[in-house]
Image: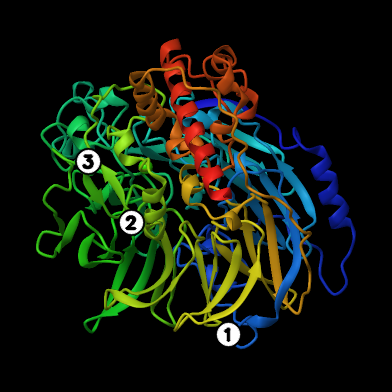
Amino acid sequence: MQRIRMMGAAAILVLGASAWLGCAAQPEAESSPRPAAAAVDSDRLLNADAEPGSWMSYGRNYSEQRFSPLDQIREDNVGDLGLAWSFDLETKRGIEATSIVVDGVMYMTSAWSIVHALDARTGRKLWSYDPQVAKDKSKHTCCDVVNRGVAVYQGQVFVGVLDGRLVALDAATGGVNWEVATVDPKLPYTITGAPRVIKGKVLIGNGGAEFGVRGFIAAYDVASGERLWQFFTVPGDPAKGFENDAMKMAADTWNGEWWKLGGGGGTVWDAMAYDPELDLLYIGVGNGTPWNQQIRSPGGGDNLFLSSIVALRPDSGEYVWHYQTTPGETWDYTATQHIILADMEIEGRTRKVLMQAPKNGFFYVLDRTDGSLLSANNYIPITWASHVDMKTGRPVETEGARYENKTFLLMPSYLGGHNWHPMSFNPQTGLVYIPVLDIPANYAQPAAGFVYRPGVANLGIDGPTSGLPDKQAERDALRPLIAGRLVAWDPKAQKEAWRVEHSGAWNGGTLTTAGNLVFQGTADARLKAFRANDGKLLWEFPTQTGVVAPAMTYELDGEQYLSINVGWGGAFALVFGEYIQPESMPNVSRVLTFKLGATGELPEVDWKPVVAFNPPAQTASAEQIAEGHNLYQEICLGCHGLNAVSGLLIPDLRGSALLHDQRGWDNVVLGGGLRARGMASFADELDGAQAAAIRAYVIEQAIRGKRVQEARAQ
Ligand code: CA
């Protein structure tokens, strides 16, 4: 373990501490003294259903159902829901966190891994903690500088920081108790997921498989931060020996020299669930590095444990079983999506099931005792496979889906049929509420060949082919195909019960409650309540910004609150500028908390998304522009958008004054001149000629954008 720092609890944010003490010193009518902050122990976590007024862990309890037994807000009065309080966040980047609420305090995370503790009754800030992530760490983020939340335990708040640190905060003051580097800080690992605490150990994985890392999950002692175990998800260089038998088994399913191309990938960047009775921890494992298996593992192989659900012993990290959703993954088909545990009667027997709707478009029901497949069916239209063979548990792939020789139109795309946005399961309706994406993408072998570039995206597919068509009419024709909907899925029947089409893609996670409700925020800036059994829209609230996070609910002093963190962002928001609706924007990041009868209002937002094009004349050759196109699609699009069309959370390069000045451009792209604002230096990856080629490509796109804008104005 790399231990970097240990501090006393009061080292940081003395102001926050005094605010807390001030609050505690004021006795509240009819209530006993405020309990100790986040006095959560293993018993409370195991018995989360005994205190439905709290939301003590990421998915509310270890089964991660995101079902609340609270029913004061219900289908016949949800129309009276109004804004009780709001809290403005300091960022204009994506907000993905689920808030934790326990003992009267809300703990949530903002972009850049910043933590806020708020009075859950009023939204008054108790303390904040900013880990001061270096802004050019954004270079290693595939999908925005987001964070999905904290874990709490025995008076501490745990946050995974974007740069790979795990930090334990004093829940009462926000002071740092300890912090550790969970990864080698030189490597392009990131943390965006929420930690979990199981049996006194805090668990965290990481991301970075687009760039080139070796995925793992590790457990840390809650008191000291000492690393107790580490489980790698893909094998390392066999010549160096294997960490355990699971890695030896996995290595037999790989070919070539994957460890030289960044480490194989397989990051554990989101899903975890725990069954205390079986004493099994379930993790979801991500895609390979590079995506393209022909490059990563020439000759094929299953490439364990990419795109798998893996069961481990939480005490030791020992491997127990796995189920691989996408053998030989070659499309960015992660199985990191939300995992839900439930006990369900299937064919007359109560089964302990595990459910997941990973990116690849199939909804899986597994027996979580041994990982055997009970059923699978596609929850969206898919092109890469026809079905899952129930004898082998493997998908039956479509001819050509591996894009060996020619371009393949893949459905779903690399964004998946379902991404990180949590789904939820309502035991009363028996339905799973999935925030579905329905977006195609073209995959082809890289025409210009593949060069592994340490520290930047290494996808191994042809960038221009997977981008947007050049003709605007063709781009416009694709618009209806960039879809998103709420799907209520019957996991027993493996079929859709009902659906609600949204006006665009990348809508929020879901919450379901005993009030026969499903809550979901949308890309077109609304929070909506639907009737859980049939999808009837019952209530909506204008959020002024696209919503990607899921709602949560809690109860205090006999009143039920509904809370959601809003703020447009994430992968789609950065990459698909061409198809983002104006209503998604701008990013207005806030905590919004509602209760029955409240009438709060938000201040007006006045903002119009317009890019001012003023490009210079093109002086580069067609070859230079083509080279720039390739490089842009490989290195730049993750932040600045497909084909240089920005989602506007990050500046649209087509409107940049630097297009007029190669030296100024180089000062930023190679010299790191805007490092403090999040634009890293790419001097290690690009030479001067390549930086100039990218500028030439962006000038070409600016000229194009200006032409389209003028045509639309006429
Ligand atoms: Ca990925």
The part of the image, by quadrant, that contains residue 481 is bottom left
The part of the image, by quadrant, that contains residue 65 is bottom left
Q: Say which residue appears at 87% left-offset and 67% top-offset.
A: 28
Instruction: Decide if residue 141 is in sight here.
Output: no
x and y percentages locating residue 235 in the rendered image: 24, 33
Nearest to the eye among marks 2 and 3: give it: 2
Looking at the rendered structure, the secondary structure element under dot 1 is: loop
x and y percentages locating residue 428 in the rendered image: 44, 82
Does residue 21 sit above or below 189 in this rendering?
below
Does residue 468 sit above or below 59 in this rendering?
above
The amino acid type of the residue labelled 3 equals Ala
State if disc 3 and disc 2 touch (CB < 8 Å).
no
Residue occupied by mark 1: 75
x and y percentages locating residue 388 in the rendered image: 17, 62
Ligand 1 within 8 Å, label 3 CB: no
Residue occupied by mark 3: 246
Q: Say which residue appears at 47% left-offset and 80% top-offset.
A: 535
Q: Nearer the viewer, residue 205 or 577?
A: 577
User: Tag 1 or tag 3, which sits nearer the N-term?
Assistant: 1
**Residue 665 as seen in the image, left or right of residue 283:** right
Looking at the rendered structure, the secondary structure element under dot 2 is: loop
User: Tag 3 or tag 2, which sits nearer the N-term?
Assistant: 3
Q: Say which residue appears at 13% left-offset and 36% top-offset.
A: 252
Nearest to the eye among marks 3 and 1: give it: 1
CA–CA distance between discs 2 and 1?
30 Å
Q: Say which residue appears at 51% left-offset and 22% top-offset.
A: 617
Q: Nearer the viewer, residue 681 or 304?
A: 681
Looking at the rendered structure, the secondary structure element under dot 3 is: helix
Q: Quadrant of ligand 1?
A: top left
The amino acid type of the residue labelled 1 equals Glu
Residue occupied by mark 2: 358
